[in-house]
Image (tube, rainbow, N blue to C red):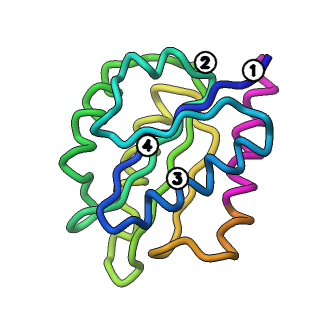
Amino acid sequence: MRIRVGIVYTSVSGNTEALGKLLAEQFHRKHCDVSLYRIENFSIDWMNKVDIFIIGTYTWGNGDLPENMSMLYRALEKVHSPNLITGVFGTGDSFFPQFCGAVDKFRDLLKHKTNLAVTLKVELFPQQQDEWKCSKFVDKCMSVWCNVV
């Protein structure tokens, strides 16, 4: 049985999108079926069709969620899926006091609503050294999935 992974993200500058694509590549290398969605093309119902659900976001303002991710956040507040393995990733600029604050907000929510496996924060555009972090992110998700099944 192939593991089904859904990755939903938002990106303005392309940084978070690039990180999402790196993660999708890493999941593909593990022989997973991966679907990558921009938030505008995502339906919360699709979350029930995956084994691992990953959220990617940049941070707006002073640690805030981007407006287009607020609907997903509110929908997740109503969910109770302790067996759904989740992860959250994001890009940010450490110049700001709340580096990747939106990642932290999703992390705190997913910790209580799902089986949160891992988080990942990357400075601006992902670099070659971040591929290792992506590999570890995927390994952690896979490890948690193996322990649940």
Q: Residue 51 at what x, y percent from top left?
A: 63, 22
- Circle 3 — which element? helix
**Residue type at numbered disc 3:** Gly
Closer to the camera in the image, 56 or 27? 27
Residue 20, label in figure: 3
The mark lying in front, picked from 1 and 3, is: 3
Q: Quadrant of the N terminus?
A: top right
In the image, which is nearer the foreground, mark 4 or mark 2?
A: 2
Which secondary structure is most common in the magenta stretch?
A: helix
**Residue drawn at 40 percent across, 46 percent down:** 9
Q: Residue at x 80, y 40 (%)?
A: 30
Residue 111, relative to residue 24: is it above or below? above
Disc 4 marks a residue whose amino acid type is Asp
Q: Nearer the viewer, mark 1 or mark 4?
A: 1
* Residues drawn in magenta: 134-149
Find numbered disc 2 in the image and state the secondary structure of the residue it sits on: loop
Circle on res. 33: none
Q: Which mark is residue 108?
A: 4
Q: Earlier in the sequence, mark 4 or mark 3?
A: 3
Q: Mark 4: which secondary structure?
A: helix
Mark linked to residue 83: 2
Q: Is residue 74 magenta?
A: no
Residue at 52% from the left image edge and 63% from the top image edge: 121
Q: Amino acid at mark 1?
A: Val
Q: Which residue is mark 1?
A: 148
State the CA–CA distance, disc 4 to disc 2: 16 Å
Mark pair 4, 3: CA separation? 20 Å
